[in-house]
Image (cartoon, rainbow, N blue to C red):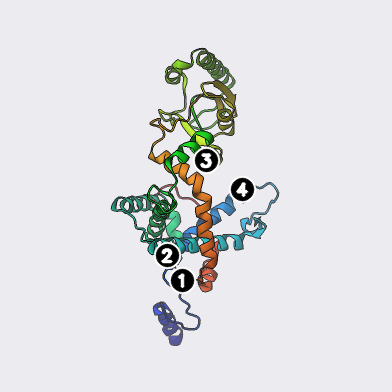
């Protein structure tokens, strides 16, 4: 019994030492310059596990209660989750290494924003993260590198970058690929519970939508006034909505809403109906000189133009880099052992 206790004590202290049966599982991926800790890997693993869970919930092909029995992208779900998590760690390492070689660093404001973002997210999901071994330092590392990745992207394609994209090209891409609409939304559901409206309220909503549509078509210049009178979309910005086909596909926008926006001509008003309600839209000019085309919007457009090229650069570097992957750490933290139950208390 004494020998067992002594052995366990040695294992507890054996960080960085190579003792049989006491492998160091504190890190996930290493190269010559960067070490990615297991907390970062576990965060990515948890994210991938959530994807596995969501796919199982949406699948009607399998009645199995074991979410890990399915395949994702023709790969066993366990292997898929682990491989994706390791690849994310490798990409993070490359981002840090490339940033160092290009002397790209965060500004004081960016560092503050990254830390604030990490703190907010860790507070919100602390229960889920803690019980799955993800500490706050891991979230801070990921958050910091998210901002660092943007700074690295700008060092290539920003105004002072090696491959700076002329402002005229950004303006042209925006004009040709983005849609700008203002809308009046009339709901067919109770927006607080998402329950369908009873027949009498549904009939009244339909009458309201038709009335708003008729007035908007007859007097386009007064559309903003009709928005104030009829719109039930409390989240709509004063400038309305601006989106491309790619950004719309990655958003939570209703398909009927975006399809209508693409189908309208500039200055035209149209209406579409979905299970959510009626969308009455007025299409504006996508004008790069308008106040709506701010720095944030310009960054989104630049990312749309050069995001694939940048991602390919990072992917190629990952494939060429020599990494040491900690298999002992992977064996210890199986995705099947993760606890995906949600705790909305934030505690």
Earlier along the polypeptide chain: callout 1 or callout 4? 1
Residue at the image position 44 percent from the left and 66 percent from the top:
36
Name the residue at 58% across, 34% down.
Answer: 255
Judged from the image, the secondary structure of the residue bearing numbered disc 1 is: loop
Looking at the image, which residue sits at the far right?
A: 61
Q: Which residue is mark 1?
A: 31
- Write the residue at 61% across / 63% down: 79
C-alpha span from label 3 to label 1 = 35 Å
Asked if one can make out residue 264 in the rendered structure from this viewpoint, the answer is: yes
The reply to whether the C-beta atoms of the residues labelled 1 and 2 are less than 8 Å apart is yes
Query: Is the residue marked by circle 4 packed among few (<14), some (14-19), or many (20+) residues within 10 Å?
Result: few
Residue 108 lies, in percent from the top left, at: 29, 53
- The reply, left or right, for residue 76 in relation to residue 227 is right
| Residue 47 screen position, x and y as percent | 51, 55
Please identify, in this view, whether the residue under mark 2 or under mark 4 is nearer the observer.
2
Q: Earlier in the sequence, mark 4 or mark 3?
A: 4
Image depth: mark 1 or mark 4 in front: 1
Of the image marks 3 and 1, the number of the one nearer the N terminus:
1
- Quadrant of the rendered structure where residue 168 is? top left
Residue under label 3: 247
Residue 57: mark: 4
Compute the Cα span from label 1 to label 4. 38 Å
> Pointer 4 and pointer 3: residues touching (CB < 8 Å)?
no
């Amino acid at each position: 019994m004494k020998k067992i206790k002594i052995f366990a004590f040695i294992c507890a202290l054996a960080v960085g030492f190579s003792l049989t049966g006491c492998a160091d599982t504190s890190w996930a991926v290493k190269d010559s310059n960067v070490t990615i800790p297991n907390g970062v890997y576990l965060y990515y693993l948890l994210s991938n596990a959530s994807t596995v869970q969501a796919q199982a919930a949406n699948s009607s092909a399998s009645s199995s209660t074991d979410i890990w029995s399915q395949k994702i992208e023709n790969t066993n779900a366990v292997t898929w989750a682990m491989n994706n998590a390791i690849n994310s760690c490798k990409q993070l390492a490359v981002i840090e290494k490339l940033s160092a070689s290009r002397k790209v660093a965060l500004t004081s404001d960016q560092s503050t924003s990254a830390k604030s973002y990490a703190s907010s997210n860790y507070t919100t999901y602390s229960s889920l993260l803690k019980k799955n071994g993800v500490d706050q330092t891991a979230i801070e590392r990921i958050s910091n590198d998210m901002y660092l990745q943007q700074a690295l992207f700008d060092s290539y394609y920003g105004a002072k970058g090696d491959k700076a994209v002329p402002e005229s090209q950004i303006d042209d891409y925006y004009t040709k690929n983005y849609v700008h609409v203002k809308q009046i939304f009339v709901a067919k559901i109770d927006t607080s519970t998402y329950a369908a409206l009873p027949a009498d309220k549904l009939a009244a909503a339909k009458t309201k939508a038709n009335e708003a549509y008729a007035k908007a078509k007859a007097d386009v210049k007064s559309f903003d006034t009709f928005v104030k009178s009829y719109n039930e979309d409390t989240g709509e910005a004063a400038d309305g909505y601006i989106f491309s086909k790619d950004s719309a596909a990655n958003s939570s926008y209703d398909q009927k809403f975006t399809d209508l926006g693409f189908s309208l001509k500039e200055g035209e008003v149209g209406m579409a109906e979905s299970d959510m309600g009626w969308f009455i839209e007025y299409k504006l000019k996508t004008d790069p000189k308008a106040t709506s085309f701010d720095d944030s919007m310009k960054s989104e457009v630049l990312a749309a133009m050069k995001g694939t090229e940048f991602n390919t650069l990072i992917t190629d570097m990952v494939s060429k880099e020599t990494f040491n992957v900690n298999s002992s750490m992977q064996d210890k933290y199986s995705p099947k052992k993760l606890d995906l139950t949600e705790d909305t208390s934030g505690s």
